[in-house]
Every structure is written in C-alpha cells, then in structure tokens.
Image (spheres, rainbow, N blue to C red):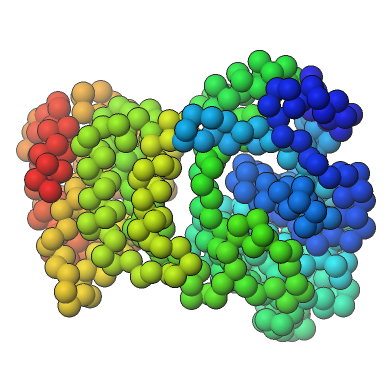
Amino acid sequence: MVLNNETLKNRAEWEAKGYKLPEYDRTAMIEKTKADPTWLHFGAGNIFKALHGMAAERLLNEGVLDKGIIAVERMDRGGEKFDDLAVVVTLKANGSVEKNILGAMAETCYLYGGEERLKEIFRNPSLQLATFTITEKGYSLAGDDVKADLLVSPEEAKSYMGKVAALLLERFKAGAYPIAMVSTDNCSHNGDKLKAAMTAFAEAWGDEGFRAYIENGEKVSFPWTMIDKITPSPDLTVGAMLEADGLEGFAPVRNARGTVKAPYVNAEESEYLVLEDDFPNGRPPLEKAGFFFTARETVDKVERMKVCTCLNPLHTALAVYGCLLGFKKISDEMKDEDLLKLVKTIGYKEGLPVVTDPGIIKPQDFIDTVVNVRIPNPFMPDTPQRIATDTSQKLPIRFGETIKAYLASDTLNVQDLKLIPLVHAGWLRYLMAVDDNGNAFEPSPDPLLGMAQEYVKDFKLGEKPDCAKLEGLLRSKTIFGVDLIEAGLADKVCAYFTELTAGVGAVRATLHKTVTEE
C-alpha cells in the first residue's frame, strides 16, 4: 500500500486500519493555496508536521480553512514525495495511538533549486505569514556562509538566512506588502533573532528602503512565540506498526551516527503554541485549533515558565542522571522513585516559587501535566541521550534563571536550593564520561564539551577530586548563568560531586540520600 492521492481514494481500506484521512476536497484546497497562498513554512520537519500541519489539518476538516500550507525544504533530495502527504502518529499516555494522514501541505518548495517559485509566492499580496522551525542555530550570523553572503548581492546569497532575506526583498520590491515573519523555534525571544538576521542583510545590501520596510511593524512583524510539543526521533516500533499495516517505503533507517530517519512522525498528544498577536496582513484563525494569541509580555512569561522551571529543567535533570544510571528512555526514569523525587522537588519546590503566572496557562496545571502525563508517557520514545545534547547551552537558562531569582528575592534563600546544585554536580560527573557502573560512555554532542571536560580530565572514579581545579568552570556565567562561587553554591556543588565520584554505585547512593533528605 503506497501513500499517495490515488490510494487514498480507497478510504475504506485505510480507515479499516485505523487511519484518519482528510475530510475535505484536497484537490480544490491545493489549487486555491497555489493560486493565493496565505501560509508558508520553512523547515518542514517533525515538529512542523505534528503541530502546525495537524492544526491546519483539523481546521481544513472542520471547514474553517479552505487553504493549506506551502512547505519549504532545503533542497529536493530526489526521494519519494508521497504527493505531499505524510503520516503523523500520536502516542497517547493511555497506551493508544492515533494515526493521521496529513494532507494540509499543498505544495513543497525548495530553498535551494526552487528559488523562482518561492519568489513568486513572496511577491503575492495574499501571503500573510511565513513560519519557521529551523532550530536556533538557523538564525545565527556567525557562520562563514552568512559572513560571505553579507559581502555579496542578494542574487548571490547562499546561506539559509541570506536566501530568506532575498525573498523578503522580493516582497518589498513587488509592492512592500505586509507580512508576519514568525519564528516558532524553541528559543527565547525568537522573533528578535529572525529580525536581527533580516536587518543585518538589509544593512549589508545598503538598501535603506528595504531596511525601513523591515523596521516598520505595520509592514513586517516578527512576533515572539513559545512552542512546546515533544516529537522525538522516529520510533522503530511505530515503523514496524506502519509496515504491518502494509505501508510501503516506511521502514525507518538508522545511520552510522545512530540517527533514525523515517517518512513518518511520532509525537506526544500535549502541545502548546503561544504567539504574539501581531500579523499586519491578517492570519488564519488558528486559535480555533488551540493556538494561543496574546501580548508579547505574556508570550515571554509562558516561555520562562516552561524553559526556566516547569519542563525543560526537569528534562535536563533526567537527561544527566539518566545517562549516568544507564537509562535508555525518559519515561522509564519516571518509574524510578529517586528520579521522580528529583524532578518533583526541582519543579514544585525549587522552581514553582519563582514562576510568574502568565494568566493564559496556569503553572501548576502545566507542571502537573508534565510530571503526571507527558514525561511518564511510556509510548514516547525519547531518550536521556538525546536530551543531553548541548547541555552546556541549556544550564544557564534552565537553572541559572531560577538561581538569579532566588538571589534577587527578599523572601527566598538561595541556600535552600538542594537539587538544582545536585544537577550541576551530576553534570560535572557526566563530563567524566563514565557511568555509575564504571563503564565508559559517549557523551552527547555539545559545543563546549571538550572545554568542560578539560576540568575533570585528571579525576578518576574512587579518588577524591581536587575541587580547586573546578574553579574556572564553576565561575563560568556562560555555562551556569551565574558565577556559582559568588552565588554561594559552589561548595554545595563540590560536596555533591565528591560524593558522586566516590566509586561504583556512588551516583545512585548520592541521589537516593539527597532526594530522601528532601
């Protein structure tokens, strides 16, 4: 059974196997979308298909929308297109799965090799928004390709941001039509990052009119957003389920680096997308699909609630200790009494007191869902190894902001923090790349891994570490968000680290003792 427009005509066969199919006239939708596009999306990966795509799918099925999304990929890799259809599998905490055929992608365009079609779309006054999920790194101006682009004409741009800026320039030249450029990547104040990139190119190209267009909020907006939906790597058991249904070409493939690639998406049921309501050319009524539209200040509060206290810090704590204790699934960690106490204490006792209630989502309800439904979901194949990626980049936000709030508070005492310092100590122990059984493991990719490991390279399991050698690392505001020595937490971190390195089994013993004391 091949996934394409023709095979979907046999609805009964698909529905008998539990698939939810598009309930609208997809041919008509595609024609309308191509003629007068309203929504373009850069980076049509897993999170886009599971969140943005499925939101549009629901509204198309309900008759709220009559146009879909034009998806933008980097380049045509010559693979099977499935007629721009996709399979999205929702893995629910109750053990059930929901299999959807996503039909909301009306067209796939290519940033490299499909420039003329993209220029045509950007020249169309009907285009209301361009959304992005290209990861935080995608907006960086530090790469050699971007630096080179800043020295050439728009037509010669080769970097991702350079080519996007050239497309926005096309819209300006066509009539300076309004548009919302909407980053929905998981990074703080994401709209500012996208705006900074577009502004840098306008300045480099010396086009004052184009720069004024970008700076004019009534013409071009760059809303802040907060996104939250776990879409882990394709699960092999999901692939096996789809193959058992008879789907051809859906076998997942694991490459030499251990990354699994597959033509389907598996994701959790919970999702949040909070957007600053700033769309100068109008927007689809996505609030009817569960998206939140609000003020910029509220987006910031929700983002801080999630990233600094109620979700991301818990994930990082589980990632560090999960790697040390040999866990392969985050959900399995939540069955461990010590690890459950670790995340509950960090979230409820140490983090929640510094959260500002954003009003549209209650922090208590959010963290309750995280702890009781989302992280324990046994059907979410997420791993501590994946979440441990780039930990040095995550620590300053996920824990540093809470420490700063305690230091600034008149009612909270930073010395009352017990388990956040335990996570810091756990990361130092993680840097030794030896698990609690004494076996070496490969740390996850991290841009500062090599530098950080230099501080622990002389330490050995079973030997008391000379914590004086850690001073330079403990003072790093880049990594911890604060100088841990100045904050008065370094001694606690070092004491925990000494316990964690005492020998085989010391990680478990220290964790159990510390969370039990809480």
* Tag count: 0
Can residue 178 be seen from the camera position used here?
A: yes
Up the image or down, 192 lies above or below 500; here it is below
Q: Residue furthest left?
A: 464
Residue at figure coordinates x 62%, y 72% from the top left? 277
Q: Quadrant of residue 190?
A: bottom right
Q: Tell me where residue 502 appears, x and y as whole percent.
A: 9, 33
Residue at figure coordinates x 66%, y 70% from the top left? 198
Residue at figure coordinates x 56%, y 58% from the top left? 273
Q: Is residue 214 left or right of residue 325?
A: right
Residue at figure coordinates x 79%, y 22% from the top left? 13
Q: Quadrant of residue 489?
A: bottom left
Q: Is residue 120 left or right of residue 487?
A: right
Q: Quadrant of residue 129?
A: bottom right
Q: Quadrant of the N terminus?
A: top right
Identify which residue, 35 or 469, lies in the foreground: 35
Identify which residue, 483 or 262, lies in the foreground: 262
Q: Tell me where residue 24 appears, x and y as whole percent.
A: 84, 45
Q: Tell me where residue 233 appears, x and y as whole percent.
A: 54, 34
Can residue 184 be seen from the camera position used here?
A: no
Q: Tell me where residue 406 appears, x and y as whole percent.
A: 21, 68
Q: Is residue 112 left or right of residue 314?
A: right
